[in-house]
């Protein structure tokens, strides 16, 4: 993203067939503008833990074209930053959480199980380029903290990941 994008929330409601003979209306989407992101970035990962929207890592292009003083505000590099937005108090803005403990990266992938965010992989534009390491973010003791997880058997970037119950599947 060239600019810090506003956060939008989506609320959806299912409805039944209206009897008109056409396809039933399945979904209504309502957009609502939230607070701007703390900086411009792309290729992050994250999830929702309880009522906290979490974003981890990513990449900031630092481009200056069309954006005065962007390079000084948004450095050109992969990120270690972690932010949270309390969806019950979004007007309070983004909170800075402890930095991601691995090397700065983009394209990492994550999944939430219970009250924990699990992340693995990703890449950067410096050695070792792609990663196998994993980390878990939680706030079990009232403080946000990262814990190391076992490495994947090989480096993975932007992997498909899904949870079913308490199991995480990587594709």
Image (cartoon, rainbow, N blue to C red):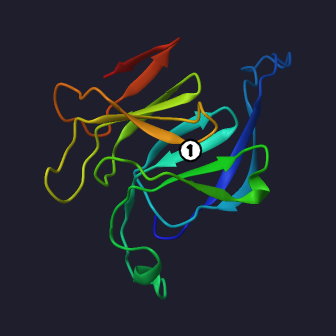
- The residue under the point 73% across, 57% down is 33
Q: Position of residue 16 (x, y in %)?
A: 82, 16
Q: Residue furthest front?
A: 141
Quarter of the figure that contains the C terminus: top left
Q: Is residue 65 above or below residue 102?
A: below
Q: Is residue 97 above or below residue 40?
A: above
Locate residue 153 relative to residue 148 in the image: left or right: left
Q: Position of residue 6 (x, y in %)?
A: 64, 61
- The residue under the point 35% across, 42% down is 108
| Residue placed most toward the observer, 34 or 11 | 34
| Residue placed most toward the observer, 16 or 48 | 48
Q: Residue furthest bottom?
A: 68
- The residue at which mark 1 appears reads as 54
| Residue placed most toward the observer, 90 or 66 | 90
Q: Residues within 10 Å of mark 1 (few under 14, many from 20)?
A: many
Locate residue 93 relative to residue 152 in the image: left or right: right
Q: Is residue 11 above or below residue 83?
A: above
| Residue placed most toward the observer, 141 or 169 | 141
- The residue under the point 79% across, 49% down is 89
Q: Position of residue 157 (x, y in %)?
A: 26, 40
């Amino acid at each position: 993203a060239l600019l810090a994008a506003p956060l939008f929330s989506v609320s959806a409601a299912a409805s039944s067939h209206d009897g008109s003979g056409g396809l039933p209306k399945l979904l209504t989407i309502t957009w609502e503008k939230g607070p701007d992101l703390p900086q411009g970035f792309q290729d992050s990962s994250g999830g929702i833990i309880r009522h906290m929207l979490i974003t981890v890592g990513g990449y900031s292009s630092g481009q200056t074209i069309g954006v005065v003083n962007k390079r000084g505000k948004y450095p050109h590099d992969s990120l270690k930053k972690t932010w949270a937005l309390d969806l019950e108090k979004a007007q309070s803005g983004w909170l800075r959480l402890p930095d991601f403990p691995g090397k700065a990266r983009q394209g990492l992938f994550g999944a939430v199980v219970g009250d924990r965010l699990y992340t693995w992989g990703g890449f950067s534009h410096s050695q070792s380029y792609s990663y196998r390491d994993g980390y878990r973010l939680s706030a079990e003791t009232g403080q946000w903290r990262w814990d190391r997880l076992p490495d994947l058997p090989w480096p993975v970037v932007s992997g498909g990941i899904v949870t079913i119950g308490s199991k995480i599947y990587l594709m």
